[in-house]
Amino acid sequence: MTKKIFHSILLAAVFVLLASLVIIMGCLYDYYRNVQEKQLRDELHLASYGVETGGSGYLEQLASPYRFPSVADYRLTWITADGEVLFDTHVPAAEMENHSDRVEVREALAEGESEGVRYSQTLTERTLYCAQRLSDGTVLRISISQLTVFALAMGMLQPILLTAIIAVILSALLAHRMAKSIVAPLNRLDLDRPLENDAYEELSPLLGRIHQQHRQIEAQLRELRRKTEEFEQITENMNEGLVLLDGKGVILSINPAAQKIFHADNSCVGQDFLVVDRNHEVSLAIQTALKGGHSEIRAGRNGREYQFDISRITADSLTAGTVLLAFDVTEQATAERSRREFTANVSHELKTPLQSIMGSAELLENGLVKQEDVPQFVGVIRTEAARLVRLVEDIIHLSQLDEGIAPAREQIDLLELADSAASALRERAEERHIDLSVSGENLMVDGVRSFLYEMFYNLIDNAIKYNLDGGKVEAVVLAGDTGATVSVKDTGIGIPPEYQARVFERFFRVDKSRSKASGGTGLGLSIVKHIAQYHHADLNLHSTVGEGTNISVAFSADK
Ligand code: ADP
C-alpha cells in the first residue's frame, strides 16, 4: 500500500511539474511573440518613414551591421507594386525573384498594411512579418525569424531535464514521507479493539464492521466450544469406542473407550489410523465404508470380542470421512456360542436314550427277546424314559432360569427345605449304605421354594451318586459372615482340580459313564449355579480326589 501511495503521489507531482512547465513556457512564448510583433510594427513604421524621406540610401545605411547591429535581426525588403525587389537588407536585390505573388505584398497593396507568420520546413523556425504600402505605391516589408516553442524547448532541454530530475527527486522524497505518514496510523490500528482506534474518520465504518465481525466470530467460537465440549462429554462417557477419521484415514477424534481398545492415547490424533491398528481387516472395512457407505466386522482385541461398525460421513454430498463405532460383544458372543453348544448337546443327550428305547422296543416288537429277558428290556425302556423325563425337566428348569421367569418369593426355612430334599433321597442313600444327615439352624431366606428345593436335591443327589458305598453325606445350614450358608459335604470320589471350575458347565461330566449309570443328566450343577445366582448367593467348591467334596452356598442377608 505504501508503494501504491508513493507511486500515485510521485506520478501526480511529475504530471503537475510537466503541466506547469508547458503552461509557463506557452504563456511566456505568447507574451514574447506579442511584444515582438509590436516591435516589428514599430520598426516598420520607423523604416517606412526613413524610406519615404531618405529612399534607398536609408536602407543601405541600415544594411551595414557595424553601424546598426539590430538590423541583423530584422530583414527589410523594398518591393515595387509589380513585385520587383528594389532593396533587401540581407540579399542583393538582383538575386531576388519577383514578390508579386506573396500574400503579405498583395494584402499590403490592397489594404495598406498586412502581417502574418510563416513556418520553416523543419518547424524549428518561423518568420514574423509585417508589410506596409508606402505613399509612392511601393511596399516595405519587415520580417524577423524566431525559434518555435518546440525548438525553444529543445534548446532548453538540458536545464529543463536538470530541473525535472531535481523536481522528481524532491517529489520522490516528499512522496515517500507522505506515503509513510499516511500508512503509519493504519499500521498502528489495533484490530482486536477496532472501536478504540483514533486513526482516520473515513475508517470508522470499516472499523465498525470489523468490530461487528469480531463479535460474530466470538459468538460462533463460543457456540463451537460449547458443542465440542458437549461432544467430548458424550463420547468420553460412552462405553462404545468411537473414532472419527477423515477421508484419508487420519484420526480426527478418538474417545477413551476406543483408546483402551486400541492401546492408544490422544497423541494419535492427526495420525493415520494404521498407527493405532494395523489389522488388515479393519483397514479394508474402512475402505469399504468409504466406497459403499457402511461396513461391519467382528474382531478380537485384548481377549475380548468387538463388533466394528463403520459408516461414511458425507457433507454437501462430498465424503468427509468415516465414523468407527466399536461395541464389546464378548458376552453376546459367548452366549451365542453356549446356546449353539447347548442345542447340540441337548440333541445328543435326547437322542441317546431315545435310541435305546427304540432299539429295545423294536426287539420286543419283533419277538426277538426271550420271554425271560423281557423284564430286562422293559427295565431299559423305563430307565431311559425316566432319564428322558429328568433331562426334559432339567432343561425346562434351566430355560426358566435363563428366561428370568420369577416365581413368587417367600420366606423359606433352609433347614426344613434341606430336610425335605434329603428325605426324598434317603432311600437311595440307604441302598448304598450312605449315612445322610441334615443339621444346623433354622435360618430363613427370601427366595423361591421350588428353586431352592431343586438346589438341595441336586447337591445331595450328587453327594450320594459320586460317593462310595458306606460313605457319608452331611447337609448343614449355618449362619455365615453375611447370612445363611448351606453346605453339602460328602466322603466320595472327589473332583480333580482341573475339572473343578468346569463341573458347573452344562453337560460337563468328569466321568460320563458313571454319571449316566447313575441317571445323571450333566445339568444338575449348572442348575445349582443358576439358582445361586438368582438368589445372589456365592457358590464355593472344595474337593479332594479320594477324600470327598464340599459345595457351599452363602446367602447374603442384604440382597
Ligand atoms: P450329573 O448329572 O452328571 O451329575 P452335574 O452337573 O450334577 O451332572 O455334575 C457334573 C459333574 O460333576 C458330574 O458328572 C460329576 O462328574 C461331577 N460331580 C458333581 N458332584 C460331585 C460330587 N459331589 N463328587 C464328585 N463329583 C461330582
Image: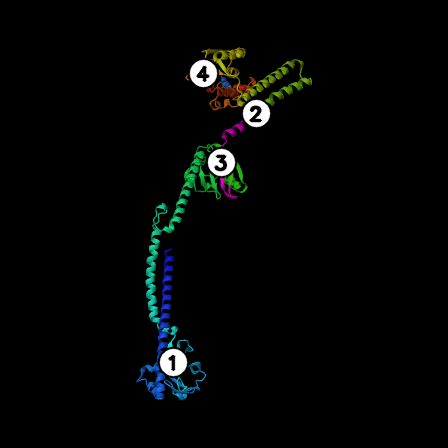
Q: Which badge, 4 or 1, comes first in the chain's sequence?
A: 1
The amino acid marked with disc number 1 is Ser
Does dot 1 land on a helix, a strand or a loop?
strand
- The residues tagged by marks 2 and 1 sit, at their Cα atoms, a distance apart of 142 Å
Mark 3 surroundings: few (<14), some (14-19) or many (≥20) residues within 10 A: some
Kindly report which numbered mark, 2 or 1, lies closer to the viewer in this rendering: 1
- For the question of whether residue 377 can be seen, the reply is yes
- The residues tagged by marks 4 and 3 sit, at their Cα atoms, a distance apart of 45 Å
Is 318 colored magenta in this rendering? yes
Q: Which badge, 1 or 3, comes first in the chain's sequence?
A: 1
- The residues tagged by marks 4 and 1 sit, at their Cα atoms, a distance apart of 151 Å
Q: Which badge, 4 or 3, comes first in the chain's sequence?
A: 3
Relative to the observer, which residue lies in front, 52 or 148?
52
Kindly report which numbered mark, 2 or 4, lies closer to the viewer in this rendering: 4
Is 216 colored magenta in this rendering? no
Q: Magenta residues, as a range?
A: 314-343
